[in-house]
Amino acid sequence: MAKQTIIVMSDSHGDRAIVEDIKNHYLGKVDAIFHNGDSELKSDDPVWDGIQVVGGNMDFYGGYPERLVTDLNGLRVVQAHGHLFHINFSFQKLDLWAQEENADICLYGHLHIPDAWMEGRTLFLNPGSISQPRGLVTERLYAKIEVENDYFRVDYYNRNHDLYPSLSKEFAR
Ligand SMILES: [Mn+2]
């Protein structure tokens, strides 16, 4: 399989302009763009054309799927905001779902904290919040994943599309 690149953002909380900016920056240049919920935008907003998006606990407009499975030429990407899997308590339920779906990548949000790790054969990734970061990393971030046959490379970027280098990681697969 040729190298694939995906962009992941989450928890924009009403900030439509940054969703549109990230989309315009990458659409047509990457294999897929994901938003992991809590956009607080309407589900029929045209900004979603070209973005795979799920609903979060603050998406009161409704109309979003709770979870999505996207197949990118055999790369299986599963995606959920995370609140319905109770990730504040444990990742056990989200991990079980990712296993059931035979996921290569599991994307989530909700915690507003950037994180990436391997569990079994699956890369789990939270892009952090592009608008309201929590925790030790105070930069507003999104993530890029480059997928090769034998590794995942994860990089985080700020709202100016500048690399946030201390969070870059590679994982063997
Ligand atoms: Mn949120």
Image (cartoon, grey):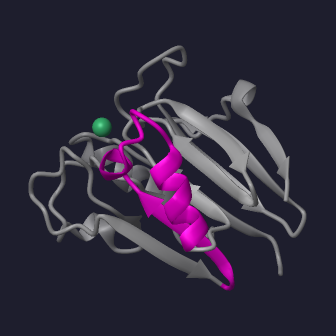
In-image side of 43 versus 71 (left or right): left
| The C terminus lies in quadrant | bottom right
Measured from the top left, where is residue 56 in percent x and y? 26, 50
Establish if 76 lies above or below 172. below
In-image side of 132 versus 142 (left or right): left
* Residue segment shown in magenta: 73-100
Q: Residue at x 68, y 54 (%)?
A: 123
Measured from the top left, where is residue 143 in percent x and y? 59, 45
Measured from the top left, where is residue 73 in percent x and y? 67, 85
Q: Residue furthest left?
A: 61
Q: Residue at x 48, y 17 (%)?
A: 138
Establish if 131 lies above or below 41. above
Can the viewer see residue 31 in this picture?
no
In-image side of 163 versus 109 (left or right): right
Q: Is residue 134 magenta?
A: no
Q: Residue at x 29, y 64 (%)?
A: 66
Q: Residue at x 74, y 55 (%)?
A: 120
In the foreground, 104 or 133: 104
In the foreground, 145 or 76: 76
Measured from the top left, where is residue 141 in percent x and y? 51, 35
In the foreground, 18 or 31: 31
Q: Which quadrant does ligand 1 occupy?
A: top left
Establish if 170 lies above or below 132. below
Q: Quadrant of residue 86?
A: top left
In-image side of 1 versus 131 (left or right): right
| The N terminus lies in quadrant | bottom right
Can the viewer see residue 149 in this picture?
yes
